């Protein structure tokens, strides 16, 4: 009986390994045949650059390119899935992705396709479809920073239809490709949805015929030129229908330069998300290891700011790693009306702007803001007042507060992370004749202290969780309202006069910081990033 069992066991084991190895050998033979069958089609990408160095030579050919293997300089998809896991799913989901990624990226264990499906399952399972905005508000910034300049120049020279092909879920890259690179067609994987939630599964790859139908709609020539990576030529059947296929080698990608911000087809003004650095695998591990210490450090910094006077708290906060750079306080012009305080007008980088101005001046200020959660209002070490967005009520309130002391206001109405200034609301220009502009700037290395779609009450905490956050406060020369506009304009056209004063203060702060002035508003930002108009819900931890 034992002999029969032993014979049966070894026989089963032999057939198992025979079938396994036979399948692997069969797949390798098939892959080699496919590569050999397409080998006569593809050429080196460098030869493409040499042949099509002028846009007239490209003509109206349809250009089909592989997003992750030809457009982006880095071939690793982990940072983008980490952003989805952390920003849309939370800390636990990000930890699970970091722990399982070594298995997902091991081709000998699970294979590339199964590894991709594992990351999709971890990042998207249980995420509500309507609330998912990471693909539009977070990922474009990091994807733009990874675009290869050489490939972007090719896209810019092409006058025909441009088609981006990706193995990632389409929802992750479509906004980046269409809105920022002006790509006509995006061919990607669709995610399965059940009852309004992602189930973490992808649909099968679209057939070549279905993709061709998308490509051939509208403008463009039927002749297609494909660009992909050397060992990814047969990844998508669409490339087999291209007249010419050019392959990018890893050595060529390593020599590429990243696209500079001044070359972006559309300026990146608004973006969301808490992570400030590109979350590669090692950076993600460093972030997760730093988080417990960061939370303790943030609590210590908040306690020092709330409990001690400015003279004692400022050096202690600097000792904890906060860098505060201030300019020499300009001489204030004589105030003819001693009954009113000074009106400080600053641009808006984080919720801590008024607090850092108070530290610079070494005295308490009254801060008025358009958006403040109840939690931040309670914890603020200086007096804060929320504006109602009713012009007459807000004007009376600000005049009343100015009679009590110095006042600081951020007329942009919302924060902006990039070097741009949003339109200044002109309400402050009607308060008094003497205005003190203040240019503020901040720099972080790990976490952004602002959000459009997250919890506003955590903004100061995330900013203070950075190892060495940097704040720069530049007190500018005072602006006399009467000198900005003509007297006749002040009396006859008050409406135009207040806008002129607001624009003058905006341009003065923009010149001091080197920022570009825009006419965009708070509403524009929140409609793009959060899908709302930026109204904070009145609760302990508001969300806007």
Image (cartoon, helix red, strand yellow):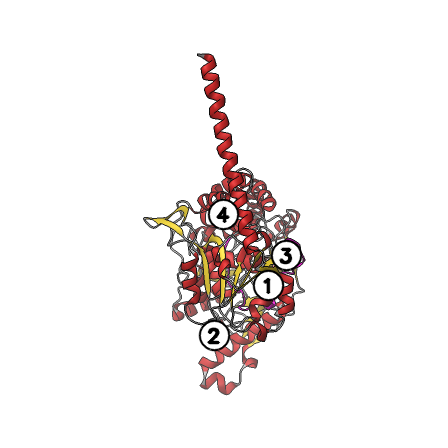
Of 20 and 414, nearer the camera is 20
Q: Earlier in the sequence, mark 3 or mark 2?
A: 3
Q: Dot 2: few (<14), some (14–19), or many (≥20) neighbours within 10 Å?
A: some
**Cα gap from disc 3 to disc 2, whole angstroms:** 56 Å
Q: Dot 4: few (<14), some (14–19), or many (≥20) neighbours within 10 Å?
A: many
Q: Is residue 452 visible?
A: no
Kindly state the secondary structure of the residue where label 4 is placed.
Answer: helix
Kindly state the secondary structure of the residue where label 1 is placed.
Answer: helix
**Cα gap from disc 3 to disc 4, whole angstroms:** 28 Å
Cβ atoms at labels 1 and 4 below 8 Å apart: no
Question: Tag on residue 151?
Answer: 1
Instruction: From the image, tell me which residue sits under label 3.
Output: 253
Where residue 86 sits in the image (x, y, percent)? 49, 47
Kindly state the secondary structure of the residue where label 2 is placed.
Answer: helix
* Stretch of the chain drawn in magenta: 250-273
Where residue 443 sits in the image (x, y, percent)? 61, 57
**Cα gap from disc 2 to disc 1, whole angstroms:** 51 Å
Residue 394 position (above or below residue 136): below
Residue drawn at x 47%, y 64% as measured from the top left: 178
Q: Earlier in the sequence, mark 1 or mark 3?
A: 1
Instruction: From the image, tell me which residue sits under label 2.
Output: 430
Q: Earlier in the sequence, mark 2 or mark 1?
A: 1
Q: Earlier in the sequence, mark 1 or mark 4?
A: 4
Instruction: From the image, tell me which residue sits under label 4.
Output: 86
**Cα gap from disc 4 to disc 2, whole angstroms:** 44 Å
For discs 3 and 2, the disc positioned in front in the rendered view: 3
Q: Quadrant of the N terminus?
A: top left
């Amino acid at each position: 009986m034992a002999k029969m069992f032993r014979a049966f066991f070894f026989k089963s084991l032999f057939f198992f390994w025979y079938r396994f190895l036979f399948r692997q050998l069969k797949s390798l033979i098939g892959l080699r045949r496919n590569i050999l069958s397409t080998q006569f089609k593809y050429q080196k990408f460098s030869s493409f650059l040499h042949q099509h160095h002028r846009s007239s030579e490209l003509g109206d050919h349809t250009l089909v390119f592989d997003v992750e293997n030809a457009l982006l300089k880095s071939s690793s998809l982990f940072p983008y899935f980490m952003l989805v896991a952390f920003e849309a799913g939370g800390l636990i989901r990000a930890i699970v992705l970091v722990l399982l990624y070594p298995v997902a990226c091991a081709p000998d264990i699970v294979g590339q396709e199964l590894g991709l499906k594992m990351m999709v399952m971890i990042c998207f399972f249980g995420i509500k479809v309507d609330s998912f905005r990471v693909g539009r508000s977070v990922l474009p910034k990091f994807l733009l920073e990874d675009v290869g300049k050489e490939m972007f120049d090719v896209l810019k020279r092409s006058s025909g239809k441009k088609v981006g092909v990706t193995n990632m879920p389409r929802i992750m890259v479509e906004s980046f490709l269409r809105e920022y690179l002006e790509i006509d067609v995006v061919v990607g994987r669709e995610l399965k949805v059940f009852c309004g939630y992602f189930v973490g599964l992808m649909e099968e790859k679209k057939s070549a015929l279905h993709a061709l139908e998308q490509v051939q709609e509208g403008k463009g020539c039927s002749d297609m030129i494909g660009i992909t990576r050397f060992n990814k030529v047969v990844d998508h059947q669409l490339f087999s229908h291209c007249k010419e296929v050019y392959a990018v080698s890893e050595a060529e990608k390593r020599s590429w330069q990243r696209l500079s911000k001044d070359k972006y087809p559309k300026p990146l003004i608004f973006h969301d998300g808490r992570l400030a650095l590109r979350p590669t695998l090692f950076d993600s591990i460093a972030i997760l290891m730093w988080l417990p210490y960061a939370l303790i450090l943030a609590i210590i910094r908040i306690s020092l700011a709330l409990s001690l006077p400015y003279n004692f708290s400022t050096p202690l906060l600097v000792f904890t790693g906060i860098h505060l750079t201030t300019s020499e306080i300009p001489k204030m012009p004589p105030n003819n009306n001693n009954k009113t305080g000074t009106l400080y007008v600053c641009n808006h980088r984080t919720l801590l702007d008024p607090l850092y101005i108070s530290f610079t001046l070494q005295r308490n200020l009254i801060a008025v803001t358009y958006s403040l959660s109840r939690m931040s209002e309670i914890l603020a070490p200086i007096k804060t007042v929320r504006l109602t967005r009713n012009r007459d009520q807000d004007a009376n309130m600000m005049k009343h507060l100015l009679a009590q002391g110095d006042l600081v206001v951020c007329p942009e109405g919302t924060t902006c992370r990039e070097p741009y200034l949003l339109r200044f609301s002109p309400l402050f220009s009607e308060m008094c004749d003497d205005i003190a502009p203040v240019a503020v700037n901040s720099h972080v290395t790990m976490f952004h202290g602002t959000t459009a779609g997250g919890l506003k009450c955590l903004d100061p905490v995330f900013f203070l969780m950075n190892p060495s956050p940097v704040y720069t406060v530049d007190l500018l020369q005072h602006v006399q309202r009467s000198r900005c506009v003509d007297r006749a304009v002040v009396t006859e056209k008050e409406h135009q006069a207040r806008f002129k004063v607001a624009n003058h203060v905006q341009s003065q702060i923009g010149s001091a910081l080197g920022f570009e002035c825009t006419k965009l508003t708070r509403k524009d930002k929140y409609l793009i990033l959060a899908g709302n108009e930026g109204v904070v819900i009145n609760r302990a931890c508001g969300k806007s």
